[in-house]
Image (tube, rainbow, N blue to C red):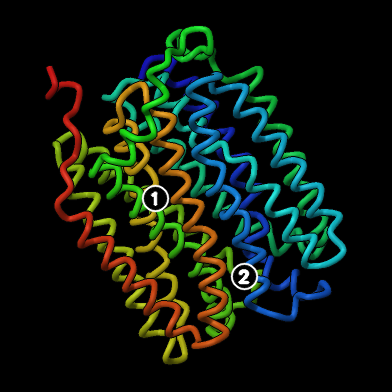
Amino acid sequence: MTPGERRASASLALVFALRMLGLFIVLPVFALEASRLPGGDDAARVGFAMGLYGLTQAFLQIPFGLASDRFGRKPVILAGLLLFALGSGVAAWAPDLTWLAVGRALQGAGAISAAVTAFLADVTRDAVRTKAMAMVGASIALMFALSLVLAPLLAGWIGLSGIFVMTLVLALLAMAVVAWVAPAEPREHRPSEMGQVRGRALGEVLRHAGLLRLNLGVFVLHAVQLAMWMAVPAMLVSAGLDKAAHWQVYLPAVAASLLVMGGVLFPMERKGKLRTAFLIAIGLILSVQLGLWVLAGSQPGLWPLGLLLFVFFIGFNTLEASQPSLVSKLAPGHARGAALGVYNTLQSVGFFAGGAVGGWLVRAHGVGALFAACAAATLLWLVVAWPMQAPATASTRR
């Protein structure tokens, strides 16, 4: 990477990290803490409120992505972070589950993932883009691990409302990073330079077979991720680990998985085997869901659960790094924001479906049905992804 690419990657990874920490920090304690609010005695309603963030993201990712193509990345990112901060304030004040859901919906309205990812793609070369996206993916994974450590402690000290106040502060810090640390936008993506060619971008994206495969993949990946956390914390408690100590399983699993990902993904990409790494990662996700399905029917042990989480994070982190990179490479340059908008829309729909459907499955059919559904969805993804071809690298195109 050039110094400019390192600065861009680090600053935008920090924006993602601050925002995703604000999102993830509530997940490990949301179901338990929300149940204390009026209306929180219904697991399906709690799951809906937890996943509602993803639904509003889904409606607004494409408009935000298109807006970033037309008006510039930075203004759109700042507007989205402001909405996220507003939603955090409403959630902090919420006197019942209904208002908590409203706050989550407003948080989701700050749908900046497409704009941030497109910004990162604008300022990095194809040859290093997967590495840049991996920095973002690693920051997300680390924030997820950090949230699993901090959330139970913070819930005891400041409660769910205090955690949402913290997410508001994190959003304001992310705005400062965008305004004063992130690099200037490339000339061709400044508002004064944008042509009318943007108008047909969405149609091109929706007809692209390779992008459609990746869109299905990100939906399944994040639906499975959120659905798992409707059941995994309770399984760890059943295995004898108090909820305040769950970080002792999560943190080593995430840290070790990042080491494995770094040692495997980048060398395979350099050797032209990104497709192989991609399909193996989907297979790992599938094997974890099958393993959790088996454990759900018995008294789980800590070691099997910890091993399955380690394998899950290897697959998850690999896909988090490779999928957005593939989208940015496959998309036409003038439609990159639109392509990432569609991609992040499906990611957000996955978040919503994982929370809402996962909560319903646990309530109506039990934990075993949840993991069986996750395994079936992942198997479908593997079948659809199998014919994919990785895009040519910069060196191959020459």
Residue at 44% x, 60% y is 253
Residue 373 point in image, percent of width and height: 38, 76
Q: Residues within 10 Å of mark 2 (few under 14, many from 20)?
A: many
Toward the bottom, the furthest residue is: 298
Query: Where does label 1 land, which residue?
Result: 317
Quarter of the image where the N terminus is located: top left
Q: Is residue 365 above or below residue 75?
A: below
Query: What label sits on residue 167 in the rendered view?
Result: none
Q: Amino acid at mark 1?
A: Asn
Q: CA distance from mark 1 to mark 2?
A: 24 Å
Amino acid residing under circle 2? Gly
Q: From the viewer's perspective, is residue 297 above or below residue 274?
A: below
Q: Camera-side residue: 198 or 228? A: 198
Of mark 1 and mark 2, the one earlier in the sequence is: 2
Residue at left offset 69%, top offset 42%: 84
As drawn, is 177 to the left or to the right of 321? right
